[in-house]
Image (cartoon, rainbow, N blue to C red):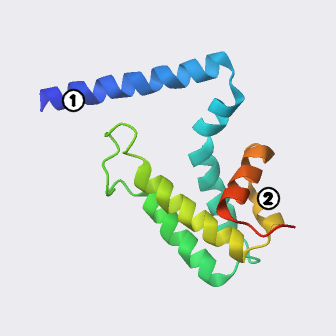
C-alpha cells in the first residue's frame, strides 16, 4: 500500500510540474490543452440547459457529464497517459453527436475556450459547414 501511495505521489508531482512548465513558458496550445476538459464540461453544462439542443442530445449529454464526473472509470486515472483516455473518448463521441445535431452557433455560444480550439474541435467532429 505504501509503494502505491509513493507512485501516486510521484505521478502527481510530475503532472503538476508539467502544468507549471506549460504555464510558465506561456505556450498557448499547452494552456488550451490543459483547459480542454474543464472547457468541455462547461460546454456540456451550457448545452444541457439550452432548449435549442434536441432532447435526445441533452439526454446523451447528461450521461456524458455523469460519466466524466464519476470517480469510477474503465481505465484508472492514475495510469499515465491512458488514465483519462476513456473520458476523452466519451467526450469526443458526445461532442461529435452534438455538433451534428445542434446548430454550430449554439455550440459556439457556450464555448469558453479559445475560438481556434473550438474551430479545430468542430472540424474534427465533422460539424456541418456554415
Give the residue furthest to the right: 130
Image quadrant in which the N terminus is located: top left
Task: Residue at 59% x, 54% y: name it.
Answer: 41
Q: Is residue 82 left or right of residue 130?
A: left
Which one is nearer the viewer's eye here, 130 or 43?
130
Q: Is residue 67 left or right of residue 71?
A: right
Q: Position of residue 127 (x, y in %)?
A: 73, 66
Measured Cα–Cα span from mark 2 to mark 1: 41 Å
Q: Position of residue 74 (x, y in %)?
A: 31, 58
Give the number of callouts: 2
Task: Residue at 72% x, 50% y: name it.
Answer: 120
Q: Is residue 90 left or right of residue 124?
A: left
The answer to whether the residues at label 2 and label 1 have Cβ atoms under 8 Å apart is no
Give the residue furthest to the left: 1
Image depth: mark 2 or mark 1 in front: 2
Res. 18 mark: none
Q: Position of residue 65 (x, y in %)?
A: 51, 63
Task: Please rate how many residues cluster around mark 1, counting C-alpha atoms within 10 Å: few if below 14, some from 14 to 19, many from 20.
Answer: few
Say if 103 sits above or below 82 in the image.
below
Image quadrant in which the C terminus is located: bottom right
Task: Please rate how many residues cluster around mark 2, counting C-alpha atoms within 10 Å: few if below 14, some from 14 to 19, many from 20.
Answer: some
Q: Is residue 37 left or right of residue 63?
A: right
Q: Which residue is mark 2?
A: 108
Q: Give SS at disc 2.
A: helix
Task: Residue at 62% x, 72% y: name it.
Answer: 97
Q: Give SS at disc 1.
A: helix
Task: Residue at 62% x, 22% y: name it.
Answer: 23
Which one is nearer the viewer's eye here, 117 or 11?
117
Q: Earlier in the sequence, mark 2 or mark 1?
A: 1
Q: Which residue is mark 1?
A: 5
Amino acid at each position: 500500500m505504501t509503494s502505491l501511495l509513493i507512485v501516486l505521489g510521484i505521478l502527481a508531482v510530475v503532472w503538476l510540474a508539467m502544468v507549471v512548465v506549460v504555464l510558465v513558458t506561456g505556450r498557448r496550445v499547452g494552456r488550451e490543452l490543459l483547459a480542454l476538459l474543464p472547457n468541455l464540461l462547461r460546454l456540456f453544462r451550457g448545452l444541457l440547459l439550452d432548449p435549442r439542443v434536441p432532447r435526445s442530445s441533452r439526454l446523451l449529454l447528461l450521461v456524458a457529464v455523469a460519466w466524466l464526473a464519476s470517480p469510477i472509470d474503465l481505465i484508472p486515472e492514475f495510469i499515465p497517459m491512458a488514465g483519462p483516455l476513456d473520458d476523452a473518448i466519451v467526450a469526443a463521441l458526445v461532442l461529435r453527436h452534438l455538433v451534428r445535431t445542434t446548430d454550430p452557433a449554439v455550440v459556439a455560444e457556450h464555448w469558453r475556450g479559445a475560438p481556434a480550439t473550438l474551430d479545430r474541435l468542430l472540424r474534427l467532429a465533422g460539424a456541418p459547414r456554415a
